[in-house]
Amino acid sequence: MSLFETIIIAIVEGLTEYLPVSSTGHMIIAQKLLNVESTEFVKAFTIIIQFGAILSVIVLYWKRFFKLNEIMIFDKNSVGGLTKCARSKVYFQRFLYKYDFYWKLVIAFIPAMILGLLFNDLIDKMLESVMVVAVMLVLGGILMLFVDKWFNHPSENQTMDWKRALKIGFFQCISMIPGVSRSMATIVGGMTTKLTRKNAAEFSFFLAVPTMAGASGLKMVKMLTEPGGMDMLRENAITLIIGCVVAFIVAMAAIRFFIDFLTKYGFKAFGYYRIIVGTVIIGLLLAGLNLSMV
C-alpha cells in the first residue's frame, strides 16, 4: 500500500465507523476506487486501524471512562450489626454503584460477544457477499427515513439501567449482518428505550469500545498465529502507525460532527445517503464489476 492509499483508507475508517452509514460498504467503494488488492496485509490493516477509532472515543469521553462513582465499598462502620449475608449484599450493591458505567457496558456487550463467538465463521462467510452489504445499506437507509418519527419520543428519565443496556445489546447483534451499521442499530435500540438521540448516540460510542476491541482483537490473534503473520505486521509497522493516527484524528472529528448534527437534524439525511451508496454498489455489481471485501 502506498502512503496515499494508507491515508485514504484510514480516513474512510475514521469517518464511517461511528456514523450510521456502514463502514463496510464504504471500504468496498474505497478499495475499488483505489484499485487496492485485498491482500492479507490489507485485511490486517483495516482491522488494526480500528484501534485508532476506538481510542478516539476514550479520549473524547475520558471523564466518563475513568471517573468512578464516589463511594467506599467496604465501610464496616455503616454495616455494623448486620449479618454476614446482609453485609455482603450491601458491599455488592456499593460495588455495582461504584463501577456502574462499566458493568452496564458489560451487560450490553454480552449478547454480541456470545453470538459473535458462536457464529464467527458464518459472519465471515456473509461478509464475502457484497450484494448483501449493498441491499442492507438500502434497506437500512429506508428505515432511517422513519426512525425519528417512530422512536424519537424521549422520556424524562434518561438514566441508563441494566434493562436499557441489555436491550441495546440485543439491537447491536443486528449489526452482525454485513451492511447493517453498528452505530445505527445501537442508537435506534437506545431510542426504543426512550433515550434522547444524543444519549443513545453516546452510549453507542461507549459500547463500541469493548465490541470493536473484542472483534478486532479476535481477528488479530488469528492473523498472528498464522505462518508469517508477525513478520508481516513488523515489516509494515510504519504504515500501521500512520493508519491508526489518521483514523484516530478523523474519528474524533466525525464523532463531534455527528453528535451536533444528530441532535439538530436527526437521521433522515443519513438515510438518503445510505440509499445512494447502496444503490451505487448494486449498480456496479449489475454492471459486472468485480467488487470484493477489504
Image (tube, grey):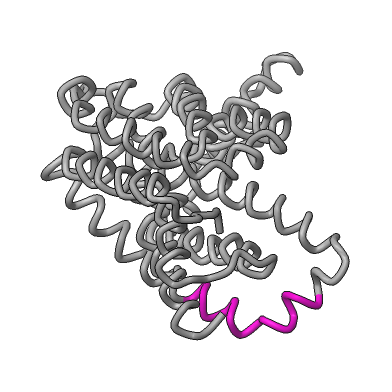
Residue at the image point whose x is 49% and y is 46% from the top:
208
Q: Left of 123 or right of it: where is 191?
A: left
Residue 256: say if magenta. Answer: no
Hey, which quadrant is residue 124 in on the image? top right
Farthest residue to the front: give it.
Answer: 288
Residue, x 48% and y 52% (percent of image)?
65
* Magenta stretch secondary structure, dominant: helix
Q: Is residue 223 left or right of residue 28?
A: right
Quarter of the rendering occupied by the C terminus: bottom right
- Foreground pick, 138 / 148: 138
> Magenta span covers which residues?
231-245
**Up/down of 182 relative to 25, above or below:** above
Q: Position of residue 239 (x, y in %)?
A: 58, 81
Q: Is residue 134 left or right of residue 178?
A: left
Measured as percent of width and height from the top left, residue 92 is found at: 64, 27
Judge whether residue 132 can be spotted in this image.
Answer: yes
Q: Position of residue 200 (x, y in %)?
A: 32, 36
Q: Is residue 214 above or below residue 144?
A: below
Residue at the image point whose x is 37% and y is 51% from the top:
284
Question: Is the residue 148 above or below the residue 203 in the image?
Answer: above
The foreground one among 86 and 288 is 288
Residue pictured at 30% horizontal, 43% vertical: 279
